[in-house]
Structures are given as C-alpha cells and as structure tokens.
Image (cartoon, rainbow, N blue to C red):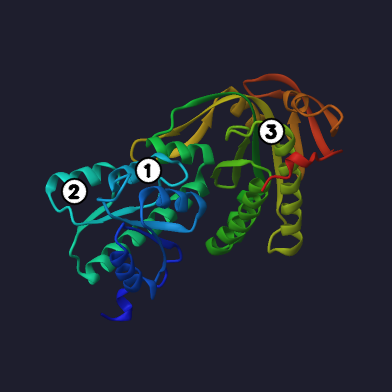
Amino acid sequence: MTHEMFDSAFEGKILVVDDSVENLKLLSGLLGSHYRVKVAKDGETALKLIAADSDIQLVLLDVEMPGMNGFEVCRQIKANPQSEHIPVIFLTGRGDDASEMEGLGAGGVDYITKPFKPEIVHARIRSQWSLQEAKAKADELLRVVLPENVVQSLLKHGRYEPVHHEDASILFCDLVGFTKATTTMSPRVLVDELSALFGAFDAIAQRWGVTRIKTMGDGYMAVCGIDGRTEAHASRLAAAALEMVEAVRLRAEEGAYPWACRIGLHAGSLMSGIVGTTRFQFDVMGDSVNVAARVESNGEPMSVTVSEEFLAALDPNQADATSLGIHELKGKGARELWRLNALKTVPTELNVG
C-alpha cells in the first residue's frame, strides 16, 4: 500500500471503539502512522472521550460490546448537538442486512464488516474526510452570505421561516458620482475599486455584528438586529456607518478615484426571509427599508444621515447629531433628518468580533 493512499490532510483524530484488545492494537497500528488515533473499549468511555476532545472528527465503531452496544452509542453521538456532526463508520462482525440497516438508521455513514481489508478501511475514511471537508467549505460559504441564525436554521431544518423583526436598524450607502466613474474607468479598475470599498465595509460590518444584505451596483445595504443579537442594534449600526465613511475617505486619498458616499440610517420593524425558487437570496422587506433608502438619498455626501426614529433608538446621551431640518421624503411625507457627527461613547458590549 503506497503512502499516497492515506489522507495526510486529515488533522483531526479518529476514535476507534472495540471491546477486543487485539482489534484495537490492529487498528491502531493500521491507522496510527497516518492519523492521530484514540481508542476506547466500551461505549460509555467512547462518549466521555468525544465530550472531552473536540479534535475527534471520525469514529470507527464496533457493534457487539458489553453494556451499551454500538447502535446505542451512535444514537447518543447523533443526539448530542456537540457531536452530531462527527461521522460514524461501523466496523463489525455483524454482516446481516438487518444489522446494517439498523446501523445506518442510527446515524452511521458507512458499515464495514469483519474481516476487513485495510485498503477498504482507508478508502472509506478518506471518503468521509473528503465529504466533511466539502461540507465545511459549503457551510463557510453560507456564513459569508447569510446571518448565523439563518445558517443554523438551514443546516438543522433545511429551511428558514420568514421572521417579523419588531425592532431593527437599516443602512443604505450609495457612492456619489458613480455614473461618472463608470465612464472614466476600465471595467477591471471599476470592479477592483468596488471590491476594495465593499470589502472594507464587510470587515467593518462583521466587527459590529451587522449583516450585509446585498450590493446593488454602487449601493450597499445592511441591517442590524435580525441575527439574534438585538442589543444596542442602532448604536452598533451607527458605529459601523461612521467607520464606513472613513473607509471611503481613506480610499479616496490613497486610491485611483476621489470616491465619496452618502449613508442613511433608519430604525423600525421589518421582515426577513429567503426569496426565490431556483436562485435564492436572503432579503429584508417592509416600509422601514423604503424609508431608510429615502433617508440616504436626502443625505449629504461623506456624512451619515439618520431619521428621527433612528436617533430615538440610540442612547440620548450617546449621539452627537445636527438637525438638517424637515425633508420631504418621496412617498413618505415630511420628516426631520439629522446628520450623525459622532458617537460620544462606545459601550464595551458593542465591540463585536
């Protein structure tokens, strides 16, 4: 058997569970040169090891053991949220169809009967590790584009039920003079500039627990308070917005184009859900979203403009704001808008991420 047959990229541990000392020695010798291996002689010990060692990423499990049999061990592994992700491969002398069906029904991902061929065991381990790696990459991609609570719902239930959020904050940002920029820049330079700006926005949003919803050409939309962390959502979004203006200012000073932006903030109720049947997108909707867009369009370049509702959602002693007077917001009536100059204090609980 060549070295290439083993997956040297496997960084976790394999737990081998068997009541036979001879089998444990055999499997430890077979796997130990290429993987980190732990052993357990019974199910109770195996469950304790799994609970104590987060590096265990795969279990090779016998069925016939004293006390708790392998099927029950597997059920308990899968019933525990801390270990349900660990693949379990049964390695047993019980080769009848009914036993195999019971093992797979208990949550096992594979079923190998003894006597086994070493290359088959290695191949099954490599296969499961590849699947785990692919799943981890897919989960990480979900976390790039979706709030954590939405990701958890999709992973556990395969769906995300639309939610009404009574109290949240919305941000709209628009790049001033973008149309002119499209006539003076090559497509590559323009896309690179947008990537740099929005990449900086994403990093800021992540630090403050803000969820980016989408980009629309030169527009950037984000919300705060819909991911299960509703505390101080307005303050966190305000802090992020002020940092975004500074990020644009820095890019204009150091980059290839004198960028400027307008940012508008509003607070109120909204709904969130996954929209689409073939191409899915997580989105938010409601009148508050429309108001936030109008606030942004009535704002001043290189400043953060906020509605009276957003200002009220902040700690009254926290905001340094200047009234911009009454503005007629298209389709929303006359409202007083404010320029947010600074936050006087940044509570420690806002230092997210």
Q: Position of residue 117 (x, y in %)?
A: 20, 69
Name the kind of residue labelled 1 in the image. Lys
| Residue 219 visible from this viewpoint | yes
Query: How far is disc 3 from disc 1 in space, using C-alphas?
Result: 36 Å
- Secondary structure beneath dot 1 equals helix
Query: How far is disc 3 from disc 2 in space, using C-alphas?
Result: 51 Å
Q: Residues within 10 Å of mark 3 (few under 14, many from 20)?
A: many
Residue highlighted by disc 1: 78
Q: Of circles 3 and 1, which is in front?
A: 1
* Relative depth, front residue between 295 and 18: 18
For residue 320, the mark is: none
Which residue occupies the extreme top position in the image? Answer: 333
Name the kind of residue labelled 2 in the image. Glu
* Relative depth, front residue between 221 and 206: 206
Q: Residues within 10 Å of mark 2 (few under 14, many from 20)?
A: some
**Quadrant housing residue 124:** bottom left
Q: Residues within 10 Å of mark 1 (few under 14, many from 20)?
A: some
Q: Is residue 310 above or below residue 216?
A: above
For residue 100, the mark is: 2
